[in-house]
Image: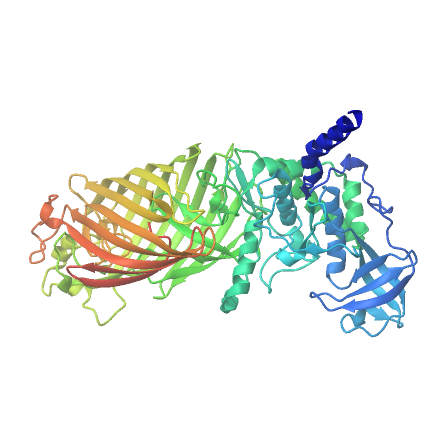
Amino acid sequence: MRVTLSVLSVLCALVLARPVFSQEAAAVIWHDRGDVTALDFGGAPLGTERGPGLEFTFVSESTNGTSPKFVVEDEYGTTWKVKLGDEAKSETAATRLLWAMGYVVDLGYYRPSARVKGMPMLARGQRFVTNGDTVTGLRLERARGGQASEAWSWYDNPFVGTREFNGLRVMMALMNNWDLKNVNNGATHPAGGGGEYGVTDLGAAFGRTGNPFTRSKGVLKDYADTRFIDEVTPTHVDFVMRSRPFFLSAVNIPNYRLRTRMERVAKDIPIDDARWIGARLGQLSVDQLNDVFRTAGFTAVEVEGYTRAVQRRIAALIALSPSTPAESVESRTEGTAPTEVTRDSSRCRTSTCRQAPVRETLTAIGIGTPYAQAMVGGFEQGAGVGGGAQVTTADAIPGVTFRAAALTSTKRYRRFDAEAFLPNIRGSRNHADVWFSHMERDLDFFGIGPRTPTTLGTRFAVVQRSYQGTLSRDLAAHVQAGVYAQVMETQSSRGSDATITPIDELFPGTPDLAVSRWIPAFGEPPRIVSYGAFLEYDTRDNRVGLTRGVNLYGRVSSADGRGGRQAPVRYGWTEREFDVRGYIPLGSPRTSLLVRHRGQFKAPGAGNQIPFTNLAWLGGRQYLRGYHSYRFRGNNMVLVSMEVQQTLRSMTPTRGIDVYGLADTGQVWGDARSTTDPTVLDGQAFSSRNWHTGVGTGLQYRHSPSVAARIEVGRSREGTEIYVTLSRGF
């Protein structure tokens, strides 16, 4: 009986213990190194393993990767992988910094030179060999024989969403490691399960991120001149990571998609996780950082420069807080939930966005330097596709950013801007923008009123110079209010197209005064002084797929001026504007209803007029598709627009191809001149018979949250219009 009970007891114990024995070990990506301040990078090998010896024997050469590589064995029988070239120093420093922060990495050791017995003629890297057996500039990394390793993905792994994994993403951005391919990651999987996940190739670090023409490795100046933080929302932070290839290389679609996707590794990282790794980095002393780069073979000047640059980045991480304003939005990394997007008030550091006097956004596209960028936009409709270049001081001058832009369009119109932007005025919620603008272009004209015929179609040229400034404050996360003032002088004249009847010859024999009354301020340069206030509520989120949220905007202003030199005409009016936009998902994120309602109401004072160039208008791709640009002009206008968008193909969280149907309706009224007698007013009142409607369809390729290529066809009772634009629509 005793034997039976003993056997049963042992069996029960084994059964109960089986889940414990069969449980797989957890996968690991991070280890606590203990007291970071006690880590010694100065000479002794890091960790518990012996460093490389002094005597080496050649084993074999490797042809993998872009850098010359071969394998050696030291006097202790340890096998080492040798890398030569411009990655040797940068990778050694990167592995040491990453190891200090607790991450799984094979430490690199740098040797200025070493003798290697049995050295053959190398297929690659022979220029680093002298005297037959002396090799210069070696990075030595322990060869882990017998341990199978497989690549793992930044976008799909057991650690997505964890603090430690997000800290690793921050480290990649901090070191400017732009080569984030899966094959540069390695995971070991022992028989008991689990395993260690680490980054196995860090050579493309401590230079500039970018395309093959702009990126670099281990170049101090490039690293020090690169911006670190791209955008901050109340909860998340985006870091600068440029890996998108040169646009002409898009013919190699798989590589273009692979490289572009890498940028998302450094995007949408929780602020708390970024501050966590920043706090750990902040424990490193100046001497420790110096030793990281000194033992990697950098010169004394480079060591000092890299230490200062890394310290600045560490300070930026520590300074992150939920109240830090946003700068720009690029994309969202897979594996993390969509985050709330705040009032994007500081994005003007990297683009040009204005709420008044005219709402506009010139989207910036980086070209590898913080002091210059390409621009998209700059003109209202009817100018073709516009864009140009902008030079800027970026963050070189504390407290203010100066910018100058030169823009043109496919119709050869011109615009020049000079600007001073102050992002923080006695607090990060207050902003000021002062700029000068000069523009020369042609615009369509069909008369003034809701029923002018297309037979009167003509064009006029305009030269417009303006000085303006805005002062705004972020009242809440999604609310901004501001005031503005502007001085504008507009000179109008005949259009440049000689095949079109000139604007001042539409009515042959009509006295100049009658023409002036019919087209107020034509041929004269009225100087208009205006001032007003605006309020915006914006919850739009286009970081993933189709846009969601609402945008509410209101503006009131007053405008006063002097008449032309030829006639005692007075100009002056009050103005009110509203713009309501809604972006409503229908059933899934791939289908959305877009609704817009806009109104503009201008009331001239007694005896005053409104220059025809300042009238409200409808018609064209922005307002009332299916009609010619600027088809109808009047004192007042209302517009209702709708789109139903359906995603055909999602390429990334921000990129995709959509098809949509559209419908617009609107009208103008007030101070309309008769098309037969310029002295007779017509169309003064809002009327149901003055509505104009257009319908159509379109196709768009969403390239980023701010840029999309759209082609749309609008059909109205006046004909069919085709529009090609680089925008996300309304």
Residue at point 42%, 60% (across, down)? 387
Residue at point 78%, 28% (across, down)? 6
Query: Which residue appears farthest toward the front when viewing the image?
Result: 1
Q: Quadrant of residue 384?
A: bottom left
Q: Position of residue 721 (x, y in %)?
A: 24, 62
Query: Which residue appears farthest toward the top when viewing the image?
Result: 2
Residue at point 45%, 47% (across, down)? 543
- Closer-to-camera residue (89/312): 89
Q: Is residue 244 visible?
A: no
- Closer-to-camera residue (439/60): 60
Q: How is the image coloured?
A: rainbow
Q: Position of residue 532 (x, y in %)?
A: 32, 37
Judge from the rendering whether residue 381 lies leftward or rightward of residue 313; answer left or right: left
Q: Position of residue 661 (x, y in %)?
A: 27, 55
Q: How many marks?
A: 0
Q: Is residue 134 visible?
A: yes
- Closer-to-camera residue (713/305): 713
Q: Quadrant of residue 486?
A: top left
Location of the N terminus by quadrant is top right
- Closer-to-camera residue (17/482): 17
Judge from the rendering whether residue 165 lies leftward or rightward of residue 87; answer left or right: left
- Relative vertical location of residue 471 with respect to residue 1 in this rendering, above or below: below
Q: Position of residue 78 (x, y in %)?
A: 87, 56
